[in-house]
């Protein structure tokens, strides 16, 4: 696993797609560089697909061909010396044959082919991603317990040498020449440098202008295109493009608006946008997801293009998903963590945060209160279904309920407590120091230093509660009353309790003392148009040092509801009892 191997630095693809016949061929001239201090005498390859594969290395000899493990070793005629490069060709092909009971390959289809490079190209060197993960199967084969991800505290001599996206490259230069059927548009990341027809086929040449992660896709389909431009802070134009199936125009304006909004927010607060285009590309709903590649975001037909917000107060998932995927152009495609625990916090959690801030600017805090309740519910369900172990956010092992759901609640709460400007300052400084970093890659422990710098001493405990531990609350409003005063104001009295717990990786909870700042709020019955919750009359933050506390708040207008942590900033085991309808006395 730790054998010295070269790193991929350049790839130039030639891709021919035949959608009607459901076949394709992909060839890549791959350049690798020996970034180690040792001479390399063999190249090892791990393959993760079943397509016919041809690796053509000049003057090399195939020494080992393990078709079961899909592992291949080539002896080089001359050792690859430190800092030297080698270029060779890799080719794969696929041809759909016969009539299947069930379509086995959804990557190549008649309209909306979606090929990912990580499904096509072999990985240089050994990759632990193919190891058997099932504990019973490992026992059956006499294997020891599989090693989990190293902690971010571990020695980085091995653990921080790879990003969590790739084990055989850092940042690569990519170009692609793609041909497809006439009438279809072929799309790859980067600038479209040339487009032509030849021998009854359509050809496209794309090149990225800067190095990127070795993580991108190639798409072909019959598309309409909606185009706009966004002008970046430097006065340069960025082309915004949405490629969509005719008849699926419903949410195009919303997607373009979210692209503009996301570009503006992230460029202003973090780093410049690195590409000259931002593309959303529809693919068929054989799969239902969206994914961020450099400057391009394939987006499922069933995940936004044909979505319909039937309820007036529903969360706008199309706007949100576009904002999340756009945020990955900063969090992952510029700043990427080492393949250790917590890596996805630096990409998925941060992308969630950027998207939440965009959503808050677009739809307001009332909608975010609804969103936080949604995210918290999913986190609580996720931890209840955990079959392995739950870890704190900075140590998560790619569990989606942690880095997405808990990450949303934590980051949104943090910006409420210490201020959006402070959170953005920490992220900006971190991004400026870590963008396009090569090995050793960064980790969550390093990021926490940036966060510590912008967090007041009185709120440092939040960093332990939110990031370093699994902390839960049981906040409850037991009684809530109001009376009208002689001066026309209203006295609101609420009795609340606050309990705090720490959980271990198996879910065992231990009660700990409360000494926390928690919001107490009073709300009117009036709701603004499109809002689900009553308008806030007064929200104050109080330090609670005992389990049971009573508050009397004076407000100037008729109250309707009141309670503790009304905006669901803290992870509450039962958030339904935070707020109660007020009862009038006297």
Image: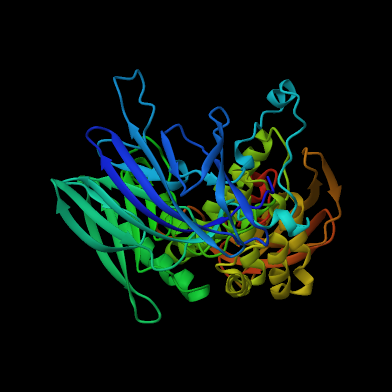
Q: What kind of colouring is applied to the model shown?
A: rainbow
The residue lying furthest to the bottom in this view is 234
Number of residue marks: 0
Which residue lies at the image location 67% right of the left edge and 28% below the top edge?
Answer: 134
401 or 36: nearer the viewer:
36
Residue 216's x, y, as percent?
Answer: 43, 52
Residue 235, quarter of the rendered image: bottom left
Q: Quadrant of the C terminus?
A: bottom right
Percent of width and height locating residue 233: 40, 80
The vertical placement of 458 against 65, above or below, is below
Left or right: 204 in relation to 557:
left
Vertical side of 198 occupied by 73: above or below: above
- Front residue of 419 and 12: 12
Q: Position of residue 288 (x, y in %)?
A: 41, 39
Residue nearest the viewer, comparing 545 with 9: 9
Given the current orientation, which residue lies at the most extreme left position?
Answer: 200
Quadrant housing residue 65: top right
Q: Tell me if I can see residue 568 in this picture.
A: no
Q: Position of residue 275 (x, y in %)?
A: 39, 68
Looking at the image, the residue that sits furthest to the top is 101
Q: Residue at x 64, y 62 (%)?
A: 439
Residue located at (34% from left, 58% from top): 279
Q: Tell me: 38 left or right of 43.
A: right
User: Can the viewer see residue 268?
Assistant: yes
Identify whether 241 is placed above or below 575. Answer: below
| Above/below status of 175 relative to 109 | below
Q: Quadrant of the N terminus?
A: top right
């Amino acid at each position: 696993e730790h054998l010295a191997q070269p790193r991929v630095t350049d790839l130039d693809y030639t891709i021919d797609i035949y959608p009607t016949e459901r076949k394709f061929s992909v060839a890549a001239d791959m350049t690798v560089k020996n970034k180690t201090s040792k001479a390399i005498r063999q190249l090892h390859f791990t393959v993760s697909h079943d397509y016919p594969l041809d690796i053509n290395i000049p003057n090399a000899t195939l020494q080992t061909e393990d078709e079961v493990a899909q592992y291949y070793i080539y002896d080089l005629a001359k050792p690859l010396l430190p800092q030297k490069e080698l270029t060779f060709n890799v080719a794969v092909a696929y041809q759909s044959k016969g009539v299947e009971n069930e379509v086995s390959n959804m990557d190549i289809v008649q309209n909306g082919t979606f090929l990912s490079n990580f499904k096509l190209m072999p990985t240089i060197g050994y990759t632990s991603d193919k190891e058997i993960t099932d504990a019973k199967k490992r026992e059956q084969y006499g294997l020891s317990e599989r090693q989990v991800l190293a902690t971010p505290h571990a020695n980085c001599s091995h653990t921080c040498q790879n990003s969590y996206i790739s084990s055989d490259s850092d940042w690569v230069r990519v170009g692609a020449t793609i041909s497809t059927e006439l009438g279809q548009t072929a799309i790859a990341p980067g600038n479209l440098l040339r487009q032509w027809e030849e021998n009854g086929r359509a050809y496209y040449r794309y090149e990225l202008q800067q190095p990127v992660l070795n993580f991108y896709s190639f798409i072909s389909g019959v598309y309409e295109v909606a185009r706009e431009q966004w002008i970046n802070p430097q006065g340069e134009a960025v082309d915004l493009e949405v490629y969509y199936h005719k008849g699926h125009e419903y949410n195009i304006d919303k997607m373009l608006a979210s692209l503009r909004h996301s570009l503006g927010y992230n460029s202003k607060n973090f780093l410049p946008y690195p590409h000259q285009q931002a593309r959303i590309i529809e693919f068929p709903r054989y799969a239902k997801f969206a994914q961020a590649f450099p400057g391009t975001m394939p987006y499922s037909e069933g995940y936004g293009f044909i979505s319909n917000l039937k309820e007036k107060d529903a969360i706008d998932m199309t706007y949100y998903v576009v904002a999340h995927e756009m945020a990955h152009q900063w969090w992952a495609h510029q700043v990427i963590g080492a393949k250790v625990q917590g890596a996805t916090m630096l990409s998925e959690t941060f992308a969630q945060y950027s998207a939440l801030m965009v959503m808050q600017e677009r739809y307001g805090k009332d909608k975010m209160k609804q969103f936080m309740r949604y995210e918290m519910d999913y986190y609580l369900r996720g931890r209840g279904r955990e079959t392995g172990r739950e870890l704190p956010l900075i140590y998560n092992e790619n569990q989606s309920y942690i880095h997405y759901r808990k990450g949303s609640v934590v980051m949104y709460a943090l910006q409420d407590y210490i201020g959006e400007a402070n959170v953005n300052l920490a992220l900006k400084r971190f991004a400026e120091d870590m963008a396009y970093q090569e090995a050793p890659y960064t980790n969550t422990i390093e990021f926490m230093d940036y966060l510590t710098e912008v967090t007041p001493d009185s709120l440092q405990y939040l960093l332990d509660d939110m990031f370093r531990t699994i902390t839960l609350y049981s906040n409850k409003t037991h009684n809530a009353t109001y009376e009208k005063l002689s001066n026309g104001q209203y006295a609101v009295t609420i009795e609340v309790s606050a309990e705090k717990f720490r959980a271990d990786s198996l879910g065992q909870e231990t009660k700990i003392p409360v000494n926390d700042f928690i919001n107490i709020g009073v709300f009117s019955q009036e709701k603004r148009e499109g809002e689900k919750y009553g308008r806030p009359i007064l929200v104050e933050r109080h330090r609670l040092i005992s389990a049971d506390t009573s508050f009397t708040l004076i407000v100037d207008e008729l109250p309707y509801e009141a309670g503790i942590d009304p905006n669901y900033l803290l992870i509450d085991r039962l958030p339904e009892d935070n707020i109660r309808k007020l009862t009038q006395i006297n």
